[in-house]
Image (cartoon, rainbow, N blue to C red):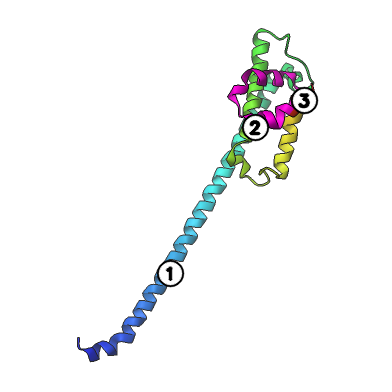
């Protein structure tokens, strides 16, 4: 192509360059939007799984109390498990460990990322009050924690057992 022909077609080439550039920008924007949407969907799915895990664990504890209602006073009414033996002692210890596992679940970053579950969130404060109250009403839970405390994070002690167990 001669220089004269190239100059004559130059605006035509520039238009295509602008169209291609605009299309690339638009494609990148749509791609970013779709990736962000997919990430948000994954975050919602993870949050749903965390809530489901919390519900399932609490449900398992409830099932034990429905099956063995004689255990509830050890966790709600301040009944000591000091004289319990055999199957009764094993069940009390098992429920105490279920509660301790449940409580430790709330120290998980995924739980803290739920709405109002961050350190100063209203739901987090409510759960902390519940756990502290649970320890204050359950010598069995405090006793089991003392036996198994190496299984749990220090935070379980500082946030719940320290305040709850010293009331006994």
- Specify which label sits upstream in the sequence, 2 or 1: 1
Q: Which mark is residue 48?
A: none
Quadrant location of the N terminus?
Answer: bottom left
Which residue in the rendered view is the most extreme toward the left?
Answer: 1
How far is disc 3 from disc 1 in space, using C-alphas?
Answer: 61 Å
Residue 63 visible in rendering: yes
How far is disc 2 from disc 1 in space, using C-alphas?
Answer: 49 Å
Q: Which residue is mark 2?
A: 155
Which residue in the rendered view is the most extreme toward the bottom?
Answer: 4
- At x 77%, y 24%, the residue is 166
Name the image quarter holding residue 121. top right
Q: Which residue is mark 1?
A: 25
Circles 2 and 1 in contact, beta carbons < 8 Å: no
- At x 71%, y 30%, the residue is 160
Name the image quarter holding residue 125. top right
How far is disc 3 from disc 2 in space, using C-alphas?
Answer: 17 Å
Quadrant location of the C terminus?
Answer: top right
Foreground residue among 113 and 163: 163
Residue 58 visible in rendering: no
- Dot 2 crowding, Cα within 10 Å, few <14, some 14–19, many 20+: few
Relative horizontal placement of residue 44, taking residue 63 as reference (left or right) = left
Whether 122 is among the magenta residues is no
Q: Is residue 2 above or below residue 16?
A: below
Please name which of the two marks, 3 or 2, marks the residue nearer to the observer. Answer: 2
Image location (x, y in percent) of residue 40: 54, 52
Question: How many badges with numbers are in the image?
Answer: 3
Q: Which mark is residue 136?
A: 3
Q: Is residue 16 above or below residue 64?
A: below
**From which residue to which does the magenta span run?**
134-162
- At x 58%, y 41%, the residue is 110
């Amino acid at each position: 192509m001669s220089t004269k022909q190239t100059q004559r077609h130059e605006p035509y080439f520039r238009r295509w360059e602008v169209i291609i550039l605009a299309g690339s920008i638009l494609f990148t924007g749509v791609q970013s939007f779709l990736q962000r949407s997919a990430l948000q969907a994954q975050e919602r799915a993870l949050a749903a799984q965390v809530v489901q895990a919390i519900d399932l664990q609490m449900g398992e504890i409830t099932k034990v109390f429905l099956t063995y209602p004689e255990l509830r006073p050890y966790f709600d009414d301040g009944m000591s498990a000091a004289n319990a033996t055999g199957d009764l002692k094993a069940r009390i210890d098992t429920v105490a460990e279920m509660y301790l596992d449940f409580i430790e679940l709330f120290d998980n970053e995924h739980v803290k990322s739920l709405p109002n579950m961050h350190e100063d969130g209203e739901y987090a404060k409510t759960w902390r009050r519940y756990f502290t109250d649970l320890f204050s009403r359950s010598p069995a839970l405090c006793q089991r924690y003392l036996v198994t405390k190496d299984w749990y994070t220090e935070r379980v002690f500082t946030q719940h057992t320290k305040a709850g167990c010293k009331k006994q």
